[in-house]
């Protein structure tokens, strides 16, 4: 890390490495660059870098870029497949976002389709779909914040209070399982359990309410089902990170609190919770960036013609408009809008966390 | 990490009445209040109930897959069938559609995992070399893709342009490198002692040789971990086949499961075996779900261990 400044300027720049703060030094080292090992630049950093195995690296830092590139040919060869992957499947689609401002025509491609400016965004904002999709997304996001986010924290705190190791391990092993099941399986289980008349869960609900419920088709049941699924799948796994944070709590704190007469609840509130506060904040920031990612697979699998009105969120809307109906430009614009809001949310949450004297992510 | 540390910290605590370092069971008088005991009991009951509710749906499906069609419709909920029959399994394994999708999924998962792990390792190694010119630029470009992506439609169009639609490559290549995993593996390589690699180089080992003979053998645990990560991701992937595979004969298991249990599109999906034979319609849904989760269940002990480690490495090093 300490060596950063001398090496840094060389990488994007095809000219030989120049280090040092004054222009005179810079020219001097440029002039001597072709020589294999020029005298160390007088910026004082030289001595610190000379130690140990980094001797070779000083040579690398000083050699002209061309020579360094040749020396590391094999490393670049190893990088190549990965770089091609990122260019093809990550950066090319980013360039492809330009079709949000075009009327995309497949035979003209990303670059040459006619530009239409913000037409698709105007269509989106004036469309009746927009408020519906936005509302659905926001309601699910809100339920997520209120119900899904705190669940692993609570379970982790309760697990932490358990002192019988065997039982604790059994419970952990059980509640981690759903994390590894696909959304297809989760949705299939839901369909089996809540099938009209025959599903065990439906029969239970029927006997409680006295009605004949059709949970899978009823729009009112869509959100509870989604939240139940998410809780079932994610809560157990979510506890891991909090349990890890809890192991770092100093046991002497509990000892001291007990001597001062704190009961279990007070110990939890004043010692355990503050100890995992920074973990909670980090998880909250991470969550905020994903708030609008309502989980395409989950929502898509649970959507049917009867509950579409409340089920459609940005991700599924993009799919239906783009893939099913072939409105590539419009659906790309919708996706871009969602992505931008997501970025604003994550940076906003980070800013908030910093304001409240917590450590942010960035 | 969580497993090992939580558990190694705990056993002493479970011991009878001594004063262990962490939360003694009956240390001081203040401790052993009735309120505390009631809390402990309630907590235990609550958590065990939670564990049961979590596994219950799955136990029900396993039981149902071994039950006869009449029993499934007669009994509302059961965890053990009266008569253990394998009708449902016999049926699904007799259809070529199901068997084909099972083979496809196993093949795609195997090939995909190898490709993804190879690409990830091969890219992570050079990125771990701090002295490599251009390395920081590349790292930043990788990290940027974690924050922002082209999104579903542009990615779909690229896959289509590349002619990958309706090929199994579409299930593998677009997800070939997970940037999060790449960064974690890179950090791991960075922690390996550079002196070892330097020694191999001085002895005349090429860069590839250093990677293959020094670095990889030291990385076996992390390679195992990420192979599992990638394998589970491909096995469970539903979005890629939904987006990129139209041809029903190329469906993976996840697509097949959805078609049978959710779309209830039995006749088309299964293919008709014998017009006079009535398939166990309910039972086969159960059986299909069970088969699609068997690999996950088989590997579960490893998964639990390695995944827990994985997310903690990720969370610590970011």
Image: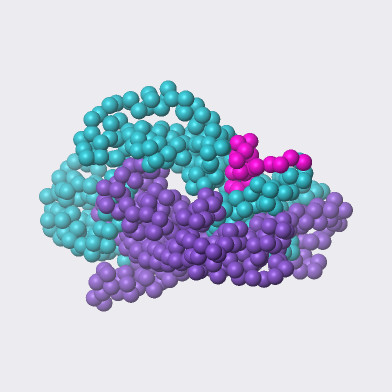
Q: Where's residue B312, x and y in %?
A: 53, 57
Q: Residue B55 vs residue B209: left or right?
A: right
Which residue is the extreme one toward the front?
Answer: B276
Instruction: Residue at 49%, 32% (x, y): give it.
Output: A133
The segment highlighted magenta reads A210-233
Q: Where's residue A147, x and y in %?
A: 64, 41
Instruction: Residue at 14%, 53% (x, y): give it.
Output: A33
Instruction: Residue at 58%, 59% (x, y): give it.
Output: B281
Q: Where A341 sits versus A65, above or below?
A: above
Is A223 included in the stretch rendered in magenta? yes
Q: Where B196 sits versus B163, above or below?
A: below
Tint of chain A: cyan
Which residue is the extreme one toward the bottom?
Answer: B203
Of residue B231 and residue A357, the one placed in the foreground of this image is: B231
Q: Residue A259 vs residue B237: left or right?
A: right
Q: Where A168 sits versus B158, above or below?
A: below
Does residue A231 show up? Answer: no
Question: Among the chains, which one is purple?
Answer: B
């Amino acid at each position: 890390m300490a060596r950063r400044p001398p090496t840094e300027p060389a990488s994007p720049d095809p000219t030989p490495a120049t280090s040092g703060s004054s222009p005179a030094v810079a020219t001097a080292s440029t002039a001597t660059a072709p020589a294999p090992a020029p005298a160390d630049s007088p910026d004082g950093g030289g001595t610190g870098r000379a130690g140990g195995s980094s001797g070779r690296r000083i040579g690398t830092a000083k050699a002209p870029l061309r020579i360094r590139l040749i020396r590391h040919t094999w490393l670049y060869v190893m990088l190549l497949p990965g770089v091609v992957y990122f260019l093809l499947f990550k950066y090319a689609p980013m360039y492809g976002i330009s079709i949000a401002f075009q009327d995309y025509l497949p035979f003209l491609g990303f670059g040459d389709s006619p530009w239409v400016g913000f037409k698709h965004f105007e269509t989106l904002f004036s469309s009746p779909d927009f408020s519906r999709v936005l509302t659905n997304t926001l309601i699910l996001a809100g339920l997520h914040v209120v119900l899904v986010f705190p669940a692993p924290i609570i379970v982790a705190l309760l697990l932490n209070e358990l002192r019988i190791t065997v039982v604790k391990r059994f419970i952990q092993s059980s509640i981690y399982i759903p994390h590894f099941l696909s959304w297809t399986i989760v949705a299939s289980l839901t369909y089996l359990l809540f099938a009209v008349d025959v599903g065990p869960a439906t029969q239970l609900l029927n006997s409680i309410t006295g009605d004949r419920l059709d949970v899978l088709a009823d729009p009112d049941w869509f959100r509870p089902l989604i939240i139940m699924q998410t809780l079932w799948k994610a809560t157990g796994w979510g506890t891991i990170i909090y349990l890890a944070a809890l192991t770092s709590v100093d046991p002497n704190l509990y000892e001291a609190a007990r001597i001062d007469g704190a009961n279990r609840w007070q110990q939890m509130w004043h010692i355990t919770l503050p100890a995992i506060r920074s973990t909670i904040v980090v998880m909250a920031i991470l969550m905020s960036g994903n708030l609008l990612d309502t989980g395409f697979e989950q929502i898509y699998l649970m959507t049917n013609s009867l509950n579409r009105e409340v089920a459609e969120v940005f991700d599924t809307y993009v799919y239906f408009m783009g893939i099913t109906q072939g409105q590539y430009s419009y659906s790309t614009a919708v996706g871009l809008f969602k992505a931008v809001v997501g970025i604003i949310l994550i940076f906003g949450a980070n800013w908030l966390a910093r304001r409240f004297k917590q450590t942010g992510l960035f | 990490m969580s497993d090992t540390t939580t558990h190694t910290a705990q056993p002493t605590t479970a011991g009878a009445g001594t004063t262990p370092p962490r939360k003694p069971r009956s240390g001081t008088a203040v401790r052993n209040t009735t309120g505390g005991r009631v809390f402990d009991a309630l907590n235990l009951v609550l958590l065990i109930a939670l564990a049961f509710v979590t596994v219950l749906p799955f136990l029900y499906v396993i039981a149902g897959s071994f039950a006869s069609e009449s029993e499934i419709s007669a009994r509302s909920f059961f965890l053990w069938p009266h008569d253990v029959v394998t009708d449902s399994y016999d049926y699904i394994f007799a259809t070529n559609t199901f068997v084909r999708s099972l083979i496809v999924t196993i093949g795609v998962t195997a090939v995909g995992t190898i490709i993804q792990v190879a690409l990830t390792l091969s890219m992570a190694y050079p990125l771990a070399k701090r002295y490599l010119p251009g390395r920081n630029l590349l790292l930043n470009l990788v990290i940027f893709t974690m924050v922002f992506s082209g999104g579903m439609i542009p990615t779909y169009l690229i896959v289509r342009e590349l002619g990958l639609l309706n090929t199994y490559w579409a299930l593998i290549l677009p997800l070939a490198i997970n940037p999060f995993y790449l960064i974690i593996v890179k950090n791991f390589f960075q922690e390996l002692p550079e002196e070892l690699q330097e020694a191999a180089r001085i002895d005349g080992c090429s860069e590839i040789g250093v990677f293959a003979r020094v670095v990889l053998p030291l990385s076996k645990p992390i390679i195992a971990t990420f192979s599992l990560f990638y394998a589970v991701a491909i096995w469970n992937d539903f979005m890629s086949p939904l987006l990129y595979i139209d041809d029903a004969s190329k469906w993976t298991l996840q697509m097949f499961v959805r078609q049978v249990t959710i779309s209830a599109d039995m006749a088309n999906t299964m293919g008709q075996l014998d017009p006079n034979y009535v398939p166990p319609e309910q039972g086969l849904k159960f059986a299909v779900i069970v088969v699609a989760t068997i690999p996950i269940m088989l590997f579960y002990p490893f998964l639990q261990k390695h995944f827990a480690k994985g997310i903690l490495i990720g969370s610590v090093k970011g």
